[in-house]
Amino acid sequence: MANSDLAKLEAIAREGRVQIIRMLTHAGSGHPGGSLSVIDILTDLYFNRMRYDARRPTWEDRDRLVLSKGHCVPAQYFCMARAGYFPESSLLTLRKLGSPLQGHPDRMALPGIEAATGSLGQGLSVAIGMALGLKLAGKGSRVYCVMGDGEMQEGQVWESLMSGPKLGAPDLHLDNLCVILDYNGIQLDSFVKKILDLEPVVDKLKAFGWPVLDINGHDIGQVDKALDQALATKGAPTFVVAHTVKGKGVSFMENDPEWHGKSPKPNEAVEAIREIVGEPTPEWAAPIIAELQAMEKKRCPPRPPAPRSEKR
């Protein structure tokens, strides 16, 4: 493990879940379920794995992250803010007109974003091109591509999966590429198995020549061990199937398609955050809860008492 302080990484992911709920509540729209399922993976990438310089987002030797499931970018925005790409106060501008923090990542608006994604199925093609370009340039940087399971149904994904292990051969195999599937089992308003089942996905990937690792995507220790194995794998890119839970950390959101693309109301956000942080409420979370409680009061002010009828 690049950094053995697992408890610190888990605390960062917990804070990320709180900020995701907060951001989406202020925005009034967005995708909580997939953002909560991917935050543990992104936490390990940003704070334990990737090489970057937040003050120099275009540093040539940086590692690249392509978040192909672009609608879950609130999780990435949290990581970027905490890493120093922009002030954490900017998180509350999510989805606001003119904000660089749009509902899908925009590389022209926000330095540090590597690819505009959200047109699902395109991110892997972009990541493969980046990995090949880095190999041709003689760079040692790595490329990480995080995908959603719903977008795995796209034809462009399977064209990329067929070509990935073959590109660059025989001298420039793309072993600088690691693809991570956030396999939470839900897309849009239903379950992946009911819409278009991916299984047996591991066998399919292996048949195309990918070394495959099958892990629990909420166990940061497992995530980091898999990334170590990917780093050590030579001659082919690595595919990590990370099993996750949509809405992880908030019981009323977990494994419920309703929370794919619906922001919580302030009172729901307070309930969610209290569950995430537990009791007693940490000092850093108390002002956030108070802020959301004030939003709820403003949204639902108390009704004035009904006028009393006079006796005659």
Image (tube, grey):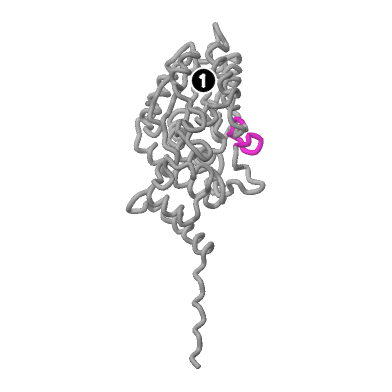
Q: Is residue 53 above or below residue 211?
A: below
| Stretch of the chain drawn in magenta | 105-115
The quarter holding residue 225 reads top left
Q: Residue furthest front?
A: 194
Q: Residue at x 59, y 21 (%)?
A: 130
Measured as percent of width and height from the top left, residue 278 is found at: 34, 50
Measured as percent of width and height from the top left, residue 106 is found at: 63, 36
Q: Is residue 77 visible?
A: no
Q: Nearer the viewer, residue 309 or 159?
A: 309
Q: Is residue 105 above or below residue 64?
A: below
Measured as percent of width and height from the top left, residue 282 is found at: 37, 51
Q: Residue at x 58, y 46 (%)?
A: 94
Q: Residue at x 43, y 35 (%)?
A: 40
Q: Residue furthest top?
A: 170
Q: How many marks?
A: 1
Q: Amino acid at mark 1?
A: Leu
Q: Which residue is mark 1?
A: 177
Q: Residue furthest left?
A: 279
Q: Is residue 299 above or below residue 91?
A: below
Screen quadrant of the N terminus: top left
Q: Is residue 92 visible?
A: yes
**Secondary element at image label 1:** strand
Residue 138 forms part of the magenta stretch: no
Q: Main secondary structure of the magenta part?
A: loop
Q: Nearer the viewer, residue 76 or 47?
A: 76
Q: Nearer the viewer, residue 127 or 209?
A: 209
Measured as percent of width and height from the top left, residue 149 is found at: 50, 30
